[in-house]
Amino acid sequence: MSMIEIALTPRECELIRLGLESMRESCSHRGDGLVITTDEAMIEEKLARAGKLRFTRHHLELVLGWVGSSTIDDLRLRDKIQAALEIAPPRKQKP
């Protein structure tokens, strides 16, 4: 499985965690935000430490969906994640 490396600052990790928390609060179909998926748990574990982190394409796509778009910091982080996804090889399609 191909991994994508991206350097995240402590602030960027916090923005992602805030986005995830906001998504959980708005998703009543998943136990009023109390249900945590395996993917979310794996990503949260990585975000506990800033620096160069490695994500699968799927996980980085999830993170991109959690990041807001209302502040300059959000927009810069979205651009950074999008750039990492564009550089990485595309996901292999199943036959």
Image (tube, rainbow, N blue to C red):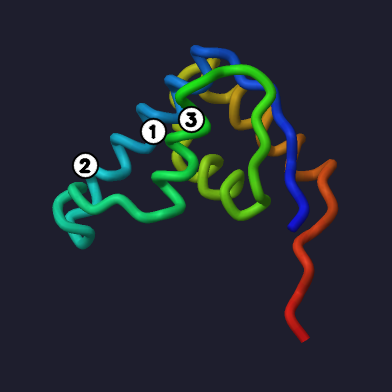
Residue drawn at (52%, 32%) of the image? 46
Q: Nearer the viewer, mark 3 or mark 2?
A: 2
Drawn side of residue 58 relative to residue 24, left or right: right
Marks counted in the figure total 3
From the image, tell me which residue sits under label 1: 19
What amino acid is labelled 3 in the image? Ser
Q: Nearer the viewer, mark 3 or mark 1?
A: 1
What amino acid is labelled 2 in the image? Glu
Q: Nearer the viewer, residue 79 or 31?
A: 31
- The correct choice, above or below, for 11 with respect to 33 in the image is above
Answer with mark 3 or mark 2, whichever residue precedes in sequence: 2
Q: CA distance from mark 2 to mark 1?
A: 10 Å
Q: Residues within 10 Å of mark 3 (few under 14, many from 20)?
A: few
Answer with mark 3 or mark 1, whichever residue precedes in sequence: 1
Q: CA distance from mark 3 to mark 2?
A: 17 Å
What amino acid is labelled 1 in the image? Gly
Placement of the N terminus among the 4 image quadrants: bottom right
| Residue 8 image position (x, y, % from top left) | 62, 21
Q: Nearer the viewer, residue 27 or 38?
A: 38
- The correct choice, above or below, for 15 with respect to 78 in the image is above
From the image, tell me which residue sits under label 2: 25
Residue drawn at (77%, 86%) of the image? 95
Answer with mark 2 or mark 1, whichever residue precedes in sequence: 1
From the image, tell me which residue sits under label 3: 69
| Residue 88 image position (x, y, % from top left) | 82, 46
